[in-house]
Amino acid sequence: MCGICGEVRFDGTHVPLEKIQTMTDRLASRGPDASGTHVEGPLGMGHRRLKIIDLSDASSQPFIDEDNEQVMVFNGCIYNYPELRAELQKAGHRFKSHGDTEVILKAWAQWGEDALPRLQGMFAFVIHEKRTGRIIMARDRFGIKPLYLNEGPGHIRFASSLQSILAGGDVDTSIDRAALHNYMTWHAVVPAPRTILNGVRKLPAATLRIIDAKGNSTEKTYWEPTFERSAEDEARSEGEWCDLLLEELRKSVRRRMVCDVPVGVLLSGGVDSSLIVGLLAEQGQEGLATYSIGFEDANNEKGNEFEYSDLIANHYGTNHHKIHIPSAEMMENLPHAIKAMSEPMVSYDNIGFYLLSREVSKTIKVVQSGQGADEVFGGYHWYKPLQSAPNPIESYALAFFDRDQKRMARHLNPDYLADRNESLAFLAEHFCRPGASDPVDKALRLDTNVMLVDDPVKRVDNMTMAWGLEARVPFLDHEVVELAGRIPSRHKLAHGGKGVLKEASRQVIPSAVIDRPKGYFPVPALKYIEGPYLEMVKDALGSQAAKDRGLFQQSYLDRLFDAPSDHITPLRGSELWQVALLELWLQAQEV
């Protein structure tokens, strides 16, 4: 796991080494073990390394392949690299390292675009072909690894974080009104290719982009999930699906143990992370390190789920680390967590993952985490009503959207209001795409490939990499997701949601964890904003910077300040935290 950056110019000028070094330095937390740069005329690349596979300097980056005249920077992990390496060696390729980085380069040289479907893992990489002058950019199927872009006359700049893009200078930092509409509608989700800033974009997940020597670009999606299923799949029993699913999940967690350092698990105590622990224990993992975090209670709402994480840790005899964060410590670290966000993210558990990652990184470099199971297997409450909804688009919007267009017009100042309901238009277009005829499948496809990518997946990447910690997500193995797409939605929505996963889990973990009320990562102090938290957001939104920017109508802010707990979104989020977080993030990035 690493951080990558660079710039390519197509106007005949050279890239300054100082710019690449500055951009690389902004990625230091993502790769605390080593740093490297490569500048060659119109091309500059930078890399920060977290040593996970092939701990020697032979896998240092930027990686130059003299045989094929290529140079590359890569962030991520290819779990099947040993098998690909063996295949490439048989084809005549010579290797000078023992890691996955060189395997990608040789695979591209051997198979070109056909290399991408062969890669099992998470990745964002950029290759420069010296012979052709082409630039190759690719991102994994679920966007687990980020790749931000800035394009201008005669250049393209890329990086693992938005902060690194900004460090390169001369970026349009004005607010993208369509992205702001998404942010205010989808609790901070801004789908690719947009970001909240007009001058920064991101390569979509499962996308290959090729740029020729003159700067002309082509882009293609190399993988898409399908929800089309055979008559045989429709007829399978729940028990058959459970057996097939467990087989795929066993392979998935086993793949994610490919490493030259120990691997632990972030254990929330929910079904998903508990199942990961159970599957690893089933495969003979002993002394597995597990980690849980909790916060102070607020408004009679519990701030931890230690009861359930303790149950799993004791059941499997893991080396368990239970971390409790006092409110004062959370308050002290909130600004640092916000500054670490490549994009503003309102989920309360950002600070949880940030502080958990800080503690985990003291003892281990790699963890597995349970993100993605709710989106892939139908764990949220808005899926079931879609089964009988006369208008699925309207049903989804009523349950998921934070505000409609009329309320948006009362909350944003006119200069920042999009000309149309951008979010509803995006939803309608996505629901109308072929490949998913069932309304529940349409919602699962949207949530897995859009909402998941730019909320929990991005959150985990940003917060873990703020401390040089690699997080692997077995529920987002593409073969697991492809299997899930074949499972009829009735099996997913059974037993109160996520039914097939719950029933499969009964073969592995204690039922007490499965039958518990649905949990989450509780941080109640940020849901019920009061005391020092209220003062913090008032200071941010009342600052001169916020007034000069003028995103929100003052009458709306006044209503939020008067009664923060009265303004809660349909998904139980704080409207005040949503608007304050955006302003706090903009100020933290000095925008």
Image (cartoon, helix red, strand yellow):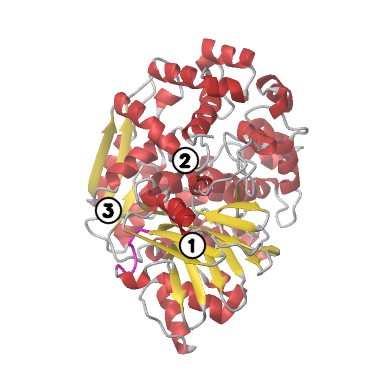
Query: Which residues make up the magenta segment?
Result: 49-55
Q: Residue at x 29, y 70 (%)?
A: 56
Q: Counting other residues with Cα less than 10 Å from the Cα at mark 3, is it few (<14), some (14-19), or many (20 or more)? A: some
x and y percentages locating residue 372 in the rendered image: 50, 49
Look at mark 2 in the image and give the residue it sits on. 341
Describe residue 352's horizontal placement relative to residue 20 as left or right.
left
Does any portion of residue 167 appear in the rendered image? yes
Q: Is residue 574 magenta?
A: no
Amino acid type shown at disc 3: Ile
Q: Quadrant of the C terminus?
A: top right
| Residue 51 or residue 565, whichever sits in front | 51
Amino acid type shown at disc 1: Met
- The disc label shown at residue 364, or none: 3
Considering only vertical position in the picture, is 319 above or below 50?
A: above
| Residue 331 or residue 429, whichever sits in front | 331
Disc 1 to disc 3, C-alpha distance? 28 Å
Describe residue 371's horizontal placement relative to residue 302 as left or right.
right
SS for tag 2? loop
Q: Counting other residues with Cα less than 10 Å from the Cα at mark 1, is it few (<14), some (14-19), or many (20 or more)? A: many
Q: Is residue 54 magenta?
A: yes
Disc 3 to disc 2, C-alpha distance? 22 Å
| Residue 423 or residue 272, whichever sits in front | 423
Q: Residue at x 45, y 55 (%)?
A: 18
Look at mark 1 in the image and give the residue it sits on. 45
Label 2 or label 1, whichever comes before in sequence order: 1
Q: In the picture, residue 187 is in which quadrant?
A: top right
Q: In the rendered structure, are the residues bearing label 1 and label 3 in contact, judged by CB atoms less than 8 Å apart?
A: no
Amino acid type shown at disc 2: Met
Judged from this view, the residue extending furthest toward the front is: 13
Q: Quadrant of the N terminus?
A: bottom left
Label 3 or label 2, whichever comes before in sequence order: 2
